[in-house]
Image (cartoon, coloured by chain):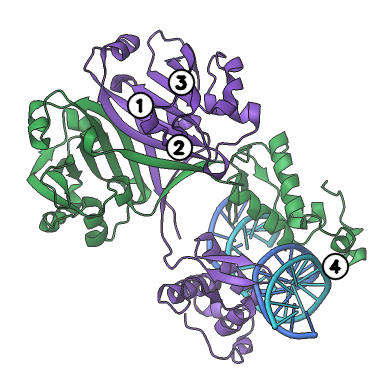
Chain colours: A green, B purple, C blue, D cyan
Amino acid sequence: MTPRKTAAAAPATGPRSVRSLAAHAAPRYMRVADALIAEIEQGTYPVGEMLPPELEIAEQYGVSRYTAREAIRKLTELGLITRRAGIGTTVTSATAQSNYSARISDIDELIHYAKETRLKILGEEWVKVEGPLAEVLKPAKGQTWLKVTALRYPQGSRKPFSHTTMVVQPAYARIRERIRESGAAVYRLIEEMYGERISEVKQEITCLALDKEQATLLGEKAGNPALLVYRYYLGKDSNLLSVSINIYPPDRFKLVTSWRLDWK
Amino acid sequence: MTPRKTAAAAPATGPRSVRSLAAHAAPRYMRVADALIAEIEQGTYPVGEMLPPELEIAEQYGVSRYTAREAIRKLTELGLITRRAGIGTTVTSATAQSNYSARISDIDELIHYAKETRLKILGEEWVKVEGPLAEVLKPAKGQTWLKVTALRYPQGSRKPFSHTTMVVQPAYARIRERIRESGAAVYRLIEEMYGERISEVKQEITCLALDKEQATLLGEKAGNPALLVYRYYLGKDSNLLSVSINIYPPDRFKLVTSWRLDWK
DNA sequence: TAGTGGTCTAGACCACTTC
DNA sequence: AAGTGGTCTAGACCACTAC
């Protein structure tokens, strides 16, 4: 589909005439969308630039504003553009990337298969963010945060499958009151007690050799390898709410993620 | 928002009157959508049942078909319903699961930050799937697959950041011809040479202590911990195309994933 | 033949941003 | 004040399904 220079000739045919002649053709908004995608890919509208306003697109392609809008909506779904009322439409990507995505319905799924786990608190204390902790908690350097250390057990088992250190922003310290509830997750307490929604979790995975203390707690031998997982819990405006540092011996834990192709 | 029994009283106010009175209120289609979601959650429309037709919903809530349709579109985006022209709208899920999802635009992003890496092939051979390999490749037990072992280097560096074993379905053995291209990724060769698209990647992460051979290849000490990552590449119909077994020393590699809340 | 979702038009008011 | 995307109405034809 090629943009028309003028739309003057169009209305003569009246509604539906085009469709009637071209049976089973793709709908108009689809053809307009394809044309726009092509223009973006060819660089007619480079990334960072603005797309023409809806009415102009409608005129160019000789369709109503609604149809132009449906076409533009398609581009939005493909992640090619961003729209803002009062401003306009910005091209954000030149390629209709068919993405892969992984989905979980709850943050819990990052951690356990079995929902049923027990948390045993080893200790709580206020810590000044400095030294190695400041490496992890850069933006909070110098502040005093609440640190909780714990072991997590599968339901019914005596052998913990993880050692966890959770560090919490002082504003949310009231979670102490409920932290000892079995199975309590710090991020969920923050959500429940403060109405602050976790909007992002950043997870970093690496590994380490257990030191003597860690090994003893987990029932392993010192020097054994274990997964080391950092999780950064972010709230609104990427505000860092909490960080957890988790150690998982490999025989009891495996992280599994499935990435699926998202169709255009 | 509660469904109205009759819509007769509505038009009296004329267009926009409601909005004018209730400044900054949520748009109508949103309120209709929320009402429908509530009805689905409450079981008024159970999973498997049909939602009323568009015109009926429009009438119930005293809005135009367009507005009802926008509301219904919202439910579709949330994965609550499936629609079929000529049939109707079926409820497919009762929970407007506000999911967390992680996205990558390319499978490569699972593996490298730097796109620029070199692959050095250590060996290729046909192997019968049995023993420990059969644990990983259960569905292919007894078959003979192509095994390729390699080291992956960051561009310009002499120190590999991973040891990789790739096992490939015999049907795709022709990738041997191009496997030695620097930077070649097995899954990409399969996509390019056979037109088979990777539709899913399942990733399992655990860790191990390096044995002498692995340690030597990676320039580490035996017994040092390392990440162990299995990746299963699936094609159409969940057909297992290839498996890779990757070993990453922790000092040179960290797996990072960001999970973002998908807003309703 | 009647009903469903899918597409489309023409025209309208709104909140917001930029000038 | 002008222009943008966001929302909304009323009315229409279409392809498809089910009866």
| The quadrant where residue A203 appears | top left
Q: Which mark lies nearer to you, 3 or 4? A: 3
Asked if marks 3 and 2 fall on the same chain, the answer is yes
- Residue type, label 2: Pro
Are dots 4 and 2 in contact, CB under 8 Å? no
Asked if marks 4 and 2 fall on the same chain, the answer is no
Q: What distance separates the C-alpha of mark 1 from that of mark 4? A: 68 Å
Q: What distance separates the C-alpha of mark 4 from that of mark 2? A: 57 Å
Figure disc tally? 4
- Residue type, label 1: Gly
Asked if marks 1 and 3 fall on the same chain, the answer is yes
Q: Residue at x 57, y 65 (%)?
A: B82
- Residue type, label 3: Val
User: Which residue position holds label 2?
Assistant: B139
Residue A15: image tag: 4
Q: Nearer the viewer, residue B19 or A253?
A: A253
Q: What is the crowding at mark 1: few (fewer than 14 residues within 10 Å), some, or many (at least 20)? A: few
Q: What is the crowding at mark 2: few (fewer than 14 residues within 10 Å), some, or many (at least 20)? A: few
Q: Nearer the viewer, residue A247 or A224?
A: A224
Specify whether A222 is left or right of A113.
Answer: left
Residue B127: image tag: 3
Are dots 1 and 4 in contact, CB under 8 Å? no
Label 2: state its secondary structure. Answer: helix
- Residue type, label 4: Pro
User: Which residue position holds label 1?
Assistant: B131
